[in-house]
């Protein structure tokens, strides 16, 4: 449900509706439904055609069964996948889609980096997906958006107007079943997908699949099963690199499932395992990516694996300069730096496109980076930013009021992923003090952030005059490192002088604060910013066993969101399940969602006096605990 500022407009509209001709109103509603249905049909048509095209281009699937209902074909493929395709005219304007001479997708006139055709026996793994949305940069007109990562991210097509008369010919001109094949005509070329009743080859995906790869221990035998439907003379083969030692179990006519067993190399390795079932002149295949489990980012980098930090992929092909730094060495201002297990390295001065990654994955934070003085972020030439994964980050005592500074430039990214951040006493983490400074993308995820006792409010991400863009704070534990103390803390602060980038997203979810109180005053809230609809503040948790600060003072009111935009509406789905727990008896501290309550919004938060932690597991000065089962899903769980 959404809560709006005024009910007067609603009342006036109600009077207008009563006065209008209901026939006109019904026609308007019907027209709106027709437009919505038309948009849905456009999107469905294009995505269905892209899926058919994917199968036709791969050339390694057969159709085991199909049906026709009017103009709609339903196809069952040999790997168990079901596709539909509806022929006939669907109104609207479509983006141009083509394939370059060297086999890459060309979308809306621009050649992409994604292959459309298989190469060297490997399927093309990317099939673009499409949807239609209002484009704020084109006066709200409907535009096509495209995704190249299965819908995780989308971008508007520059020449992607979805309204008006269709200027592009349909992607698929014609389909028909003829001579034992499903024939797909694209442009002037006909692609054939064989129709072979009963020919199946569908891998039953193992449970240990992560990020699209089957994860198995190096040097240890493992297996998966494949659904088949074998007749006399059928052959089953498994193809994998020789060092993966893959074999298929015995089979005969009538077999409906075979087992593929592999023994991978003991060192980090990845490959594609392909299973083929041949029936006469037709062959059906399915495949699975496999990857050995490793405890070392450095070893995986050397083996050519991808290492993900947010939306950034680091590997030795895109970033060949990576090296392992040992104890006492100083990392450069730019580069990909792996920090040896148990080592402490140094960093000083400015950084630009600096990537710091722990050697090991064990999350014990034994790869440390100690900084000297204020660290200046960014460069106008930077394209990555400052990225950290798995490291412990600390600083000396020579700082003034903040640790990281950005006074001139825009940084592409500041990403802290599975890190341990140890703030110096009485110091803020960052400061963006110039109207030209800022961060386009900020990610703080699965981090421990320790804050020692302070006599003033401590600010984590502070924008005085800078510009900031997308913000994601997920699954972090912020905690007071001083025993029997609490302090005022603001994870995200924007002053009135700071600016917002257009169409930005802010998501603050599943964070835990331990003995860090959210002040209601000038530096207020978990996130002091004028909240906008669709930004999220969900499933965050506060625990405190001391509500008085150094000197005996006590804040009177604490808030999660320090400000609100009076022109916005609010949806509880985006601001929900923020919990406060305390064992302070008769605490006078009042908790709210917003400083000022939107009309009709359930703003008050009543602290719960039952501990959310399993007895004896809370180590508050280290930010460690185990949640009771009934509180799973609230706060952070760092694995």
Image: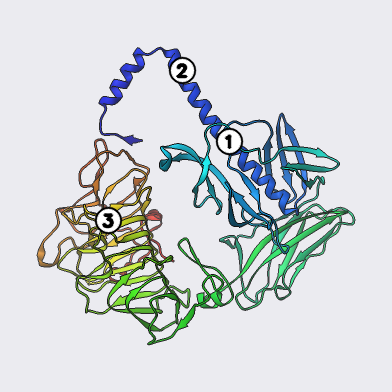
Indicate which disc residue 581 carries.
3
| Spatial CA span between label 1 and label 3 | 50 Å
Residues at marks 2 and 1 touching, judged by CB atoms closer than 8 Å: no
**View extreme (bottom): residue:** 328
Give 94 or 154, whichever is nearer the viewer. 94
Give 39 or 338, whichever is nearer the viewer. 39
Q: In percent of the image, x 33 and y 54: which residue is there?
A: 540
- Res. 240 image quadrant: bottom right
How far from the left and from the top, in percent, is residue 312? Answer: 48, 64
Whether residue 605 appears in this view of the structure is no
Q: Secondary structure at mark 1?
A: helix
- Work out whether mark 3 precedes mark 2 in sequence or the reverse, and give the earlier one: 2
Indicate which disc residue 42 carries.
1
Dot 3, crowdedness within 10 Å: few (<14), some or many (≥20)? some
How far from the left and from the top, in percent, is residue 345? Answer: 37, 83
How far from the left and from the top, in percent, is residue 166? Answer: 59, 34
Give 552 or 244, whichever is nearer the viewer. 244
Colour scheme of the picture:
rainbow
Dot 2, crowdedness within 10 Å: few (<14), some or many (≥20)? few
Quarter placement of the N terminus:
top left
Residue holding disc 2: 26
Q: In percent of the image, x 20 and y 47: which residue is there?
A: 595
């Amino acid at each position: 449900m959404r809560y709006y500022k005024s009910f007067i407009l609603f009342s006036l509209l109600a009077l207008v509706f009563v006065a209008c001709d209901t026939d006109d109103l019904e026609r308007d509603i019907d027209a709106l439904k027709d437009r919505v249905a038309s948009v849905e049909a456009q999107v469905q048509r294009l995505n269905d055609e892209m899926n058919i095209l994917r199968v036709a281009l791969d050339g390694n699937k057969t159709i085991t069964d199909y049906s026709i209902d009017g103009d709609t074909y339903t196809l069952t493929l040999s790997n168990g996948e079901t596709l539909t395709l509806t022929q006939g005219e669907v109104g609207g304007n479509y983006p141009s889609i083509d394939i370059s001479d060297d086999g890459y997708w060309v979308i809306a006139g621009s050649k992409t980096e994604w292959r459309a055709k298989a190469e060297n026996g490997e399927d093309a793994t990317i099939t673009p997906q499409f949807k239609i949305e209002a484009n704020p940069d084109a006066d709200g007109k409907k535009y096509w958006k495209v995704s190249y990562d299965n819908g995780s991210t989308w971008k508007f097509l520059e020449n992607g107007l979805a309204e008006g008369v269709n200027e592009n010919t349909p992607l698929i001109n014609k389909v028909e079943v003829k001579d034992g094949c499903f024939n797909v005509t694209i442009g002037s070329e006909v692609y054939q997908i064989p129709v072979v009743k009963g020919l199946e080859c569908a891998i039953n995906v193992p449970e240990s699949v992560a990020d699209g790869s089957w994860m198995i221990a190096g040097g240890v035998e493992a297996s998966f099963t494949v659904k088949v439907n074998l007749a006399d003379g059928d052959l089953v083969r498994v193809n994998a690199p020789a060092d993966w030692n893959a074999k298929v179990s015995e089979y005969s006519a009538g077999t409906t499932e075979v087992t593929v067993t592999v023994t991978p190399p003991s060192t980090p390795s990845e490959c594609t395992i392909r299973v083929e079932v041949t029936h006469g002149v037709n062959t059906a295949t399915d495949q699975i990516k496999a990857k050995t489990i490793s405890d070392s980012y450095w070893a995986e980098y050397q083996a050519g694996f991808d290492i993900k930090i947010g939306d950034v992929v680091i590997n030795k092909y895109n970033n060949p300069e990576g090296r392992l730094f040992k104890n006492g060495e100083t990392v450069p201002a730019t580069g990909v730096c792996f920090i040896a297990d148990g080592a402490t390295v140094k960093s000083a001065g400015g950084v630009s496109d600096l990537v710091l990654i722990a050697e090991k994955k064990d999350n014990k934070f034994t790869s440390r980076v100690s900084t000297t003085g204020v660290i200046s972020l960014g460069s106008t030439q930077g394209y990555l930013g400052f990225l950290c994964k798995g490291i412990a980050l600390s600083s000396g005592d020579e700082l003034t009021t903040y640790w990281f500074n950005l006074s001139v430039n825009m940084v592409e990214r500041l990403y802290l992923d599975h890190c341990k951040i140890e703030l110096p006493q009485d110091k803020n983490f960052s400061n963006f003090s110039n109207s030209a400074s800022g961060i386009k993308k900020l990610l703080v995820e699965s981090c421990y952030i320790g804050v020692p006792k302070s006599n003033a409010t401590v600010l984590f991400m502070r924008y005085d005059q800078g510009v900031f863009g997308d913000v994601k704070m997920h699954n972090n534990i912020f905690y007071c490192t001083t025993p029997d103390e609490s302090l005022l803390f603001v994870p995200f602060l924007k002053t009135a002088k700071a600016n917002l980038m257009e169409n930005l997203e802010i998501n603050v979810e599943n964070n835990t604060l331990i003995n860090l109180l959210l002040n209601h005053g000038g530096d207020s809230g978990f996130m002091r910013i004028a909240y906008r609809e669709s930004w999220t503040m969900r499933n965050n948790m506060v625990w405190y066993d001391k509500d008085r600060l150094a000197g005996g003072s006590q804040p009177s009111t604490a808030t999660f969101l320090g400000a609100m935009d009076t022109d916005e509406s609010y949806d509880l789905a985006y601001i929900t399940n923020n919990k406060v727990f305390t064992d302070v008896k008769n605490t006078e501290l009042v908790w709210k969602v917003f400083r000022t309550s939107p009309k009709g919004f359930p703003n008050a938060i009543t602290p719960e006096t039952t501990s959310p932690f399993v007895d004896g597991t809370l180590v508050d000065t280290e930010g460690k605990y185990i949640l009771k089962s009934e509180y799973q899903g609230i706060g952070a769980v760092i694995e």
